[in-house]
């Protein structure tokens, strides 16, 4: 049985995606060279939204522009040959019984959605990462499936080890292999894990109504590539279903109909050409294909003014809604190291979650409300849950858009995240007249950003006591959060890190 080259390409790229996803993890080395951010850098939606919001270009996103250029020449090949989410949908859709399309989605809704996102980016609010298909898949894996896999295997290993008897040595070897090369460095369960799962599950559920429903009717990346495919030098012939044969409708993963080519839904999987019993299907240059085949080739639709204007206006209002933030929450809004301008960070971040995945001390989490509605899914540092490792710069290495700068380790150590402040109403030496040296002991900064002053005082029993009262040197503190994380007080800590960011 012959297999379309596109199917083989899908399998290879999906395997590459999972291998890069697993490689984007701390494995005992200070550098991560191959990372899943390669897929984001080849993503045209990420590149276009970045350029529109930041009004500049970075060489990191050149692969995305090349993908857009090749789509203008070849057609919408990315969806049918490369996209990992599209490949997963192709694998699961055949096992889902269809009940008929959703009529509201069979409109120009996808164009309104795309132009709304691009228009919002033009008005300095980059929201494309929320609905980017690669970001959706990476977040679902990072926040839910990958930690669950690690937790399940590690928690069940102790019980299995006692049952395998004489094969314990082989079992130990196999477990060591999984631990060192497959499982996450540590399992962190994130606040938005179920929201990420629900969005991914929603895309799968859409397959019940139509094959590649997400890709055809919602995906902003697919819509963008479909528009670019309108300039393709090649076209499919016949352009419509042959009157004496309708096999293409059952073969095509996007449900071939009279409008598939007009709407740019053809993903160039070549299944129709491979399985055409009459050998009629061809993909030819437009000049060569002129006058050949059955039916007249359709051209991609020219966007109506109401779609363009509607997307522009809705993007403007959406940007105003998402950019609103209450000032009260900004003092505790801590971004990853190297992020010195909040406005710049918001425009560049694609919400992929890679920085959170590689964070050694589980300090970074997806924001729910800390950064306002605009900051949804963007990384924030929560010291009470984790701290920024002084000897680590992995988050900057894996960021696909340089929203978190890839700083050399010596520069990263000097990067200011925030500044620690001692609450004397909670701190043990001040409030309870009990010595405590935890914060100073853990401070990683050379010369110590937390120091002591020795004072003599009277405790609550009326006895003289010599106390070491901590104080913070604001000029040395980088706000890594280890002092807040290690503070022995339960609940509210005696020392907290506050933001010093601009923007």
Image: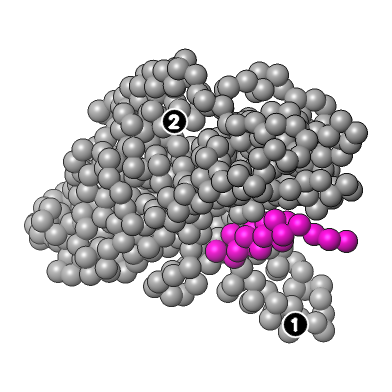
- Name the chief secondary structure element in magenta: helix
Instruction: Please determine whether, in this image, residue 38 is positioned above or below residue 160.
Output: above
Q: Is residue 368 visible?
A: yes
Task: Give the left or right position of residue 168, taking residue 434 as reference.
Answer: right
Please provide the residue range marked out in magenta: 1-20
Earlier residue among tags 1 and 2:
2
Instruction: Please determine whether, in this image, residue 415 is positioned above or below residue 195.
Output: below
Is 7 contained in the magenta span?
yes
**Residue in the picture at 39% in, 73% down:** 30
- Which is nearer the eye, 172 or 99? 99
**Residue in the picture at 80% in, 53% down:** 274
The residue sitting at the top extreme is 306
Q: Position of residue 420 (x, y in %)?
A: 21, 50
Instruction: Please determine whether, in this image, residue 491 is positioned above or below residue 458.
Output: above
**Residue in the picture at 64% in, 47% down:** 288
**Residue in the picture at 73% in, 28% down:** 258
| Labelled pair 1, 2 in contact (Cβ < 8 Å) | no
Q: Position of residue 359 (x, y in %)?
A: 42, 59
Task: Give the left or right position of residue 441, taking residue 489 as reference.
Answer: left
> Any mark on residue 170, and which?
1
Residue at label 2?
117
Q: Position of residue 1 (x, y in %)?
A: 88, 61
Task: Give the left or right position of residue 37, taking residue 5 as reference.
Answer: left
Q: Secondary structure at mark 1?
A: helix
Q: Is residue 346 visible?
A: no
Is 301 contained in the magenta span?
no
């Amino acid at each position: 049985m012959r297999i379309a080259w596109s199917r083989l390409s899908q399998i290879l790229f999906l395997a590459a995606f999972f291998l890069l996803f697993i490689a984007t993890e701390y494995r005992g080395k200070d550098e991560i060279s191959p990372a899943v951010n390669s897929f984001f850098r080849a993503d045209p939606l990420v590149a276009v939204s970045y350029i529109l919001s930041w009004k500049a270009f970075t060489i990191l996103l050149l692969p995305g522009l090349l993908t857009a250029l090749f789509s203008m020449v070849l057609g919408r090949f990315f969806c049918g040959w490369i996209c990992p989410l599209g490949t997963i949908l192709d694998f699961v859709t055949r096992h889902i019984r269809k009940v008929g399309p959703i009529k509201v989605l069979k409109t120009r809704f996808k164009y309104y959605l795309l132009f709304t996102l691009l228009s919002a980016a033009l008005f300095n609010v980059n929201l494309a990462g929320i609905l980017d298909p690669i970001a959706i898949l990476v977040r679902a894996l990072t926040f839910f499936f990958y930690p669950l896999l690690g937790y399940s295997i590690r928690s069940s290993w102790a019980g299995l080890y006692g049952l395998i008897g004489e094969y314990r040595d082989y079992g130990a070897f196999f477990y060591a292999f999984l631990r060192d090369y497959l499982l996450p460095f540590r399992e962190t369960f994130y606040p938005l894990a179920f929201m990420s799962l629900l969005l991914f599950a929603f895309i799968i559920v859409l397959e019940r109504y139509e094959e590649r429903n997400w890709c055809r009717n919602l995906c902003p990346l697919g819509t963008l590539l479909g528009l670019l495919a309108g300039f393709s030098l090649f076209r499919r012939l016949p352009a419509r279903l042959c009157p004496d044969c309708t096999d293409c409708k059952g073969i095509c993963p996007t449900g071939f109909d009279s409008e598939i080519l007009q709407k740019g839904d053809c993903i160039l999987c070549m299944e129709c050409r491979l399985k055409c019993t009459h050998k009629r299907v061809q993909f030819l240059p437009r000049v060569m294909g002129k006058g050949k085949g059955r039916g007249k080739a359709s051209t991609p639709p020219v966007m109506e003014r109401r779609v363009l204007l509607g997307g522009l206006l809705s993007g403007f209002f959406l940007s105003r809604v998402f950019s609103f933030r209450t000032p009260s929450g900004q003092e505790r809004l801590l971004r990853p190291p190297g992020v010195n301008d909040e406005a710049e960070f918001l425009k560049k971040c694609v919400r992929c979650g890679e920085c959170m995945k590689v964070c050694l001390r589980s300090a970074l989490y997806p924001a729910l409300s800390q950064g306002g509605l605009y900051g949804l899914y963007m990384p924030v540092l929560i010291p009470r849950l984790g701290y920024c490792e002084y000897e680590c710069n992995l988050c900057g290495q894996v960021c696909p858009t340089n929203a978190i700068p890839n700083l050399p380790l010596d520069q990263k150590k000097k990067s200011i995240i925030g500044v620690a402040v001692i609450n004397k109403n909670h701190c043990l030496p001040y409030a309870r007249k009990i010595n405590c040296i935890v914060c100073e002991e853990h401070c990683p900064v050379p010369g110590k950003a937390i120091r002591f002053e020795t004072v003599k005082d009277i405790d609550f029993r009326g006895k003289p006591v010599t106390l070491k009262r901590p104080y913070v040197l604001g000029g040395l503190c980088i706000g890594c959060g280890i002092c807040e994380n290690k503070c022995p007080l339960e609940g509210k800590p005696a020392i907290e890190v506050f933001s010093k960011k601009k923007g």
